[in-house]
Image (cartoon, helix red, strand yellow):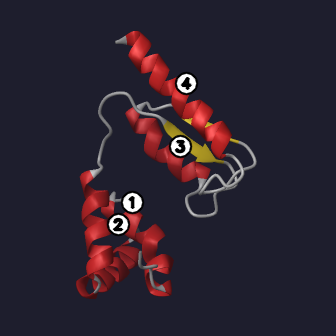
Amino acid sequence: MTSKSSACVAIEPDLIAAATGEAVASAASRVQSHIAGCATCRNDYTHYRAVETVVGETLVVHGDEDDVVTLSDVLGWARPQQLPVTVLPGTGHFFHGYLPKLQQVVTRFCASIVDAG
């Protein structure tokens, strides 16, 4: 697995914002310049563009100490789609130290879908 360059890591928040139509003009311009020469980020941009809305049963879990994607951004994305967000206090983007709790949340969610179906 190849890690992303520092330029790719730095532009990712703007990349997501541009793909979802929420970037300011200067950020959107930077993203377009970057993806013109970066196939990896161009591919990510394409995938982000494809995720306009979520259909069906959806579980959104967020760590309140996430320093990659802010909780306010997640709530702003989920709100128009009327998606509930489960917040795990004390954890970050990768849920380090909280994987058993994350597993419980996911297992409970999956069981509720099976029970409802």
Task: Name the residue furthest right.
Answer: 90
Quadrant of the image for the N terminus?
bottom left
Q: Looking at the image, which residue is at 46% across and 26% down? A: 110
**Residue denoted by label 3:** 75
Are circles 1 and 2 on residues that touch, CB within 8 Å?
yes
State the mark number for residue 107.
none
Front residue of 112/61: it is 112
Q: Nearer the viewer, mark 1 or mark 4?
A: 4
Q: Looking at the image, which residue is at 55% across and 41% down? A: 61
Q: Nearer the viewer, mark 3 or mark 4?
A: 4
Residue kind at label 1, given as amino acid type: Glu
In the image, 85: left or right of 96? left
Expressed as whole percent of the image width and height from the top left, the position of residue 39 reads 26, 80
**Residue denoted by label 4:** 108
Expressed as whole percent of the image width and height from the top left, the position of residue 16 reads 39, 63
Residue kind at label 2, given as amino acid type: Ala
Expressed as whole percent of the image width and height from the top left, the position of residue 30 reads 36, 82
Q: Nearer the viewer, mark 4 or mark 2?
A: 4
Q: Using a 10 Å C-alpha cutoff, classify the residue at mark 4 as few (fewer than 14 neighbours), some (14 to 19) or many (20 or more).
A: few
Residue 37 vs 42, above or below: the answer is below
Q: CA distance from mark 3 to mark 4?
A: 21 Å
Looking at the image, tell me whether mark 3 or mark 2 is earlier in sequence order. Answer: 2
**Residue denoted by label 1:** 22
Expressed as whole percent of the image width and height from the top left, the position of residue 4 reads 44, 79
Q: CA distance from mark 4 to mark 2?
A: 34 Å
